[in-house]
Image: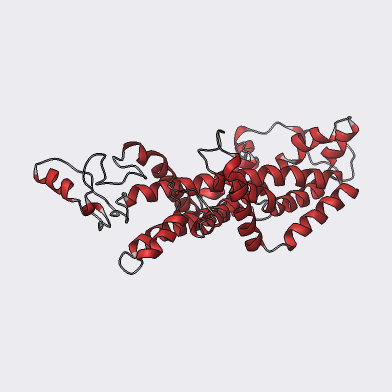
Amino acid sequence: MKKNPLSMQVDLEDFTPATDEEKAYIVTMRPASTFFRDGIKRLKKNPVAVVSFFVIVIITLSAIFVPMFWPYSYDQMLGMAPGQPVDNSFLNLQPFQYGKTEQARIDAGETVVPHIFGTDSQGRDYFIRVIYGTRISLAVGFFASLIVLVIGLTIGSISGYAGGKVDLVIMRIVDMIYSLPDMLMVILLAAVLKQVLANSLEGTIFEAIGSNIISLFIVFGVLYWVSMARLIRGQILSLKQQEYVLAARAAGAKGRWIILKHLIPNCFSVIIISTALQIPSAIFTESYLSFLGLGVNAPLPSLGSLASDALNGLQSYPYRLVIPAIVISLIVLSLNLFGDGLRDAFDPKLAK
């Protein structure tokens, strides 16, 4: 029976339950996911970022585990044993060369671990010094970025949420720090703090770390947090007017609770991206400070200090400069490419 088109009577056939086939055709359910999972999926589709990630992992694991089983230490001067004459055959060895005593052991049938990158002018195995230099550079870059993250996140979130005079004062301080010449201030602060901390660290737990590394951390804490603070402040300013923040205020939540529970978690993408891009900047800063003699304390090696020491024999042993330079370039390039991949994967504006 056909229904009158002008009738107001409800057609019961419109309320007939759909079959399973109709539900499957009409409703296409997407598996439950999160922002982090979606970002990881997009990151895996970026081959450059994935390759860069594995390069970083391989370099980091090598810097951590190779010194555990390598028979030479970074400060061991081969051919200089107590009570025995100095064996000069270990000085300035070419890659995969051996000293006289090592060659005699090889002739006797013993197994001797080769000097992959040769030795330096003091008879120290150059390969393990490069490995230790990579470890020091990575550690300094990571902890310096962590310091920048904590300071910038704290100041930026307070400035953005408080607003008013608090935001005005903090932003003027940020502008003043931005106006300072970075290179000159880093060199001056590193030189001054090196002298100030040299005597004050004696007898403390920080003596083993060295005054130069402590001064590097202080330099990063004083100068390099401003970019992070500005990014976090901008995100907080755009988020604090959202409905969920207003609802939390209406419920009586305090500012600290709102920042920690609502605002900072929604800045997660910016935090990840900025931190990932800050690490190569910190490594590069440590490298050129060590190159100038203001970085890691001797005898601890750094990639920058190894490059600086290689200048003395540049014409005879150019590979001593090329090797640490390649390692620095590889680390910085991989971290930058991985940071770009994180930005493309976790930035909501770029998400497809």
The one of 298 and 184 positioned closer to us in this rendering: 298
Indicate the position of residue 141 as horizontal and vertical percent values.
55, 48
Residue 327 sits in quarter? bottom left
The one of 109 and 123 positioned closer to us in this rendering: 123
Q: Which residue corresponds to the image point at 82% horizontal and 38% vertical from the top-left? A: 244
Q: Which residue corresponds to the image point at 41% horizontal and 57% vertical from the top-left? A: 324
**Horizontal side, residue 259 vs residue 148: left or right:** right
- The quadrant of the picture occupied by the N terminus is top right
Is residue 269 in view?
no
The one of 61 and 253 positioned closer to us in this rendering: 61
**Horizontal side, residue 254 vs residue 215: left or right:** right
Indicate the position of residue 168 as horizontal and vertical percent values.
86, 53
Indicate the position of residue 249 as horizontal and vertical percent values.
88, 35
Q: Which residue corresponds to the image point at 83% horizontal and 44% vertical from the top-left? A: 161
Q: Which residue corresponds to the image point at 62% horizontal and 50% vertical from the top-left? A: 193
Indicate the position of residue 175 as horizontal and vertical percent values.
78, 59
Count numbered badges in the picture: 0
The one of 352 and 234 positioned closer to us in this rendering: 234
Is residue 62 in view?
yes
Q: Is residue 46 above or below residue 1?
A: below
- Find the residue positioned furthest to the bottom: 315
